[in-house]
Each structure stands twice: as structure tokens, then as C-alpha cells.
């Protein structure tokens, strides 16, 4: 079928196509009982063209009912083709698809979702959209959703509990099929609001599951142990730590895992070397300045994430310190930027591909059976050694 988007010649061609499909021969005579049908289609198609006059190159306004009339089928048959049903014959499917293509018809997903009770949207709530770790994770997760014909709704809390509550409300209003909440500043009431509305939830580092609630915990214990062992092998004995934002779960988990790891490896730290950050470069720089002002310096510093480490690196350079000759610095996350700073950063890699896959698996399992108990997932880390760590200074 020729396109209806172009000039009058193309429209005339389209009208002729309709005539031929309905039984009009090349001598301009309607054949038998098809005459009324052919003339009716011509009149109807002419009306559609007139309604869309001046819309060349754009999407034309046409309904499922109008497509059905052009194709000579019922609206239900058109709906089946749109939804990918195999109950329609191949010939009819091709005819309907040709009309849909020529009119650039876009189905009304809201109506489809209202009927099915599913929005085919997953939500994800993250704490910091400016952090490359989360932007990389969101990109990968969205790619997985596109492969499964789903959409993604993203909300950013900026580490504020009130924004988390608003983000949860957005998810409820959009009737998402499931939500991954990676923001640690999560209140129980917000979680219950989702679960009570039968919306499956995946949380991060809460170490708690329930009906419709799964959790993905990053194995910082193993990762910090591996990192502490690496520093011990390089001769380091005095280790500092720049943590994350105070008062949130993941900051506590990372700090506790660091302290456990250095004890296991026979290393030492002290109060002036353990400071808070904010998971951003300015927090890393401020934390590094606090440690440098403490007098005796640690031989190495571990940070809660790579942005913190990059801020610490910058402050160390400003103070005239050489990395790693004077002090070693290591991060966590292994964002793409880690390999671009000077010197390249030693980091605990958290695979965004694995993380996104676990979120997808957990939500898919929950949406198929919401009465099931959620699962506890453990995401491993891997130490990536680069030039920011070296032998301890004497």
C-alpha cells in the first residue's frame, strides 16, 4: 500500500490500491457485490486524507476502528495484530500491518495497559544521578528492559528522604510493575506503600527480604578483605578511610567492612584517619584535608567510592604529595573515570552488568508470583589494581 504521508499523487495511488483490493478492475468497473464495499472504502479513505491534510511527514490521526474498516475486519482483529496474537491469519495480519505502517499508527499504550492491568514499566530510584556508577547502571538496566519491551521510570533522591518519598509516590501514580530502590535513605512507610499496592520491590544493602521484597547486597566484606590484603602485601600498616554520607545504611556497611578487614589483616587505623565523606569529589577532598591535618599520616587511604577517591587524589596533589610514592589511595565501584585519572585508580569493581541483571531477575520473579518470599542476592566485587597503590613509604 502506498504511503499517505506524501503528495497528491501518492494519495491517488493509495486510493487506487483500495479500489483494487476491493474488486475494482482496470476498466474502472466495480465487480459484482464488491461495488458498494469499494465505493465505501474510497469515501472513507478520502475523509481520512482530508482530516489529515497538511500533516505531511507527521503521524496521521487514525483509530483502531478506522484501520479495521480499511482492512475489512473487526476492531478486535486489529487489536490482536497490534498485541502480537497468533490467532489472526497471515494474510490478514499482513494487510493490517501494511495499513498501520502507511498511516504511521502508534497504539495507545495507556489503553492497552489499562485493559491488561500491567504498565510494562519498571521504576528505579537512585541516590545521585551525577554519580557515573548509577548513570552507567541505569543505562545497562534500560537496555535490558528495551530487549523485553519494557520501559523505565527513573527517580533521583539526591540523598534526601523527602525526595525518596516523593519518588515512591511517582511510582505508585504511574502504576509501575516493580521498583528497584537503590537509595539508602528509605523509610519503612514508603516501602510498605509499594508492597501494599502489590508492587514488587528490590532494595540495596538492606539485608532484609519479605513477601514481594528482594534485596541485593554488595559483598563489601570480601572486597574490603581483598583490598586490605593487597595493601598489606605492599607493606602498608597504617590505613585511613574516607566514608560516605553519615546516617545511611550503605555508609555504615562499607565502614564496618573496612574496619573488619584491616583487623583481619593485622593492620591499624585510628580516629583521626577515619572521616566521613559524601560519595562526591568535594567530600573526598574535604576528608583528605582532615586526614592530612591530623599529624602523622597513614600510608594508604581507602575510600567509600571512586568519586571520593578522585577528590582525595586531587587534594593530595594540591598539597604536593606524590601518589603512590608518599601515600596510596584506593576506591570502590571502578567507574570508567577510574582508569583516566592520574595515576589510574586501584578500585573494587562492582559489575553494573551483573547488578542490572540481578535487579531484572528479582523483579521478573516477583511480578510472576507476588506472594512468594523475596530473595537475598549477593553481588561480588573484584579488586582492580592500578597505579594509585604502591609500596608503603618508609
Image: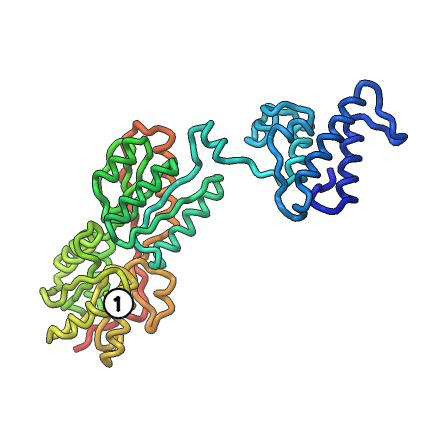
Q: Residue at x 15, y 70 (%)?
A: 291
Q: Horizontally, is 381 left or right of 187 in the view?
A: right
Q: Position of residue 13 (x, y in %)?
A: 79, 39
Indicate how the structure is coloured in the image. Answer: rainbow
Looking at the rendered structure, the secondary structure element under dot 1 is helix
- Quadrant of image for the C terminus: bottom left
Looking at the rendering, which quadrant does residue 71 occupy? top right
Q: Residue at x 11, y 75 (%)?
A: 296
Instruction: Give the residue at the far top of this rendering.
Output: 33
Residue 162, placed above or below residue 189: below
Crowd band around label 1 with a 10 angstrom C-alpha radius: few (<14), some (14–19), many (20+): some
Q: Position of residue 189 (x, y in %)?
A: 22, 38
Q: Horizontally, is 274 left or right of 82 in the view?
A: left
Looking at the rendering, which quadrant does residue 19 occupy? top right
In-front residue for pair 106/135: 106
Looking at the rendering, which quadrant does residue 392 occupy? bottom left
Q: Position of residue 158 (x, y in %)?
A: 29, 54
Residue 114, placed above or below residue 124: above
Instruction: Give the residue at the far bottom of this rendering.
Output: 320
- Quadrant of image for the N terminus: top right
In-front residue for pair 122/254: 122
Can you identify the residue that label 1 sits on? 282
Residue 151, placed above or below residue 240: above
Q: Residue at x 31, y 31 (%)?
A: 197
In-front residue for pair 303/125: 125
Q: Residue at x 25, y 38 (%)?
A: 191
Q: Horizontally, is 76 left or right of 351 in the view?
A: right
In-front residue for pair 35/219: 35
Amino acid at each position: 500500500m502506498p504511503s499517505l504521508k506524501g503528495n497528491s499523487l501518492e494519495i491517488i495511488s493509495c486510493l487506487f490500491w483500495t479500489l483494487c483490493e476491493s474488486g475494482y478492475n482496470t476498466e474502472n468497473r466495480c465487480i459484482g457485490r464488491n461495488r458498494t464495499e469499494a465505493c465505501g472504502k474510497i469515501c472513507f479513505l478520502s475523509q481520512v486524507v482530508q482530516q489529515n491534510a497538511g500533516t505531511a511527514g507527521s503521524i496521521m490521526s487514525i483509530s483502531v476502528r478506522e484501520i479495521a474498516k480499511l482492512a475489512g475486519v473487526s476492531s478486535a482483529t486489529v487489536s490482536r495484530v497490534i498485541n502480537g496474537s497468533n490467532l489472526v491469519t497471515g494474510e490478514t495480519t499482513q494487510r493490517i500491518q501494511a495499513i498501520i505502517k502507511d498511516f504511521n499508527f502508534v497504539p495507545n499504550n495507556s489503553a492497552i495497559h489499562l485493559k491488561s492491568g500491567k504498565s510494562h514499566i519498571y521504576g528505579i530510584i537512585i541516590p545521585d544521578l551525577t554519580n557515573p556508577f548509577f548513570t552507567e547502571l541505569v543505562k545497562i538496566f534500560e537496555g535490558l528492559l528495551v530487549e523485553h519491551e519494557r520501559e523505565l521510570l527513573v527517580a533521583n533522591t539526591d540523598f534526601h528522604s523527602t525526595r525518596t518519598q516523593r519518588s515512591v509516590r511517582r511510582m505508585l501514580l504511574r502504576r509501575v510493575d516493580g521498583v528497584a530502590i537503590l537509595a539508602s535513605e528509605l523509610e519503612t512507610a514508603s516501602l510498605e506503600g509499594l508492597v501494599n499496592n502489590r508492587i514488587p520491590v528490590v532494595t540495596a544493602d538492606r539485608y532484609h527480604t519479605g513477601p514481594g521484597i528482594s534485596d541485593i547486597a554488595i559483598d563489601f566484606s570480601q572486597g574490603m578483605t581483598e583490598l586490605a590484603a593487597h595493601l598489606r602485601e605492599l607493606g602498608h600498616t597504617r590505613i585511613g578511610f574516607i566514608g560516605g554520607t553519615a546516617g545511611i545504611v550503605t555508609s555504615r556497611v562499607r565502614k564496618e567492612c573496612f574496619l573488619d578487614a584491616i583487623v583481619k589483616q593485622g593492620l591499624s587505623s585510628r580516629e583521626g584517619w577515619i572521616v566521613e565523606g559524601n560519595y562526591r569529589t568535594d567530600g573526598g577532598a574535604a576528608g583528605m584535608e582532615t586526614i592530612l591535618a591530623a599529624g602523622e599520616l597513614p600510608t594508604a587511604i581507602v575510600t567509600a567510592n571512586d568519586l571520593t577517591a578522585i577528590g582525595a587524589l586531587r587534594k593530595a596533589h594540591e598539597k604536593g604529595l606524590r601518589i603512590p610514592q608518599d601515600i596510596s589511595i584506593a576506591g570502590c565501584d571502578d567507574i570508567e573515570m577510574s582508569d583516566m585519572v592520574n595515576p589510574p585508580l586501584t578500585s573494587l569493581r562492582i559489575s553494573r552488568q551483573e547488578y542490572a541483571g540481578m535487579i531484572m531477575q528479582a523483579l521478573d520473579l516477583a511480578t510472576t508470583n507476588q506472594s512468594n518470599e523475596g530473595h537475598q542476592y549477593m553481588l561480588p566485587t573484584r579488586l582492580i589494581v592500578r597505579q594509585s597503590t604502591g609500596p608503603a613509604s618508609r
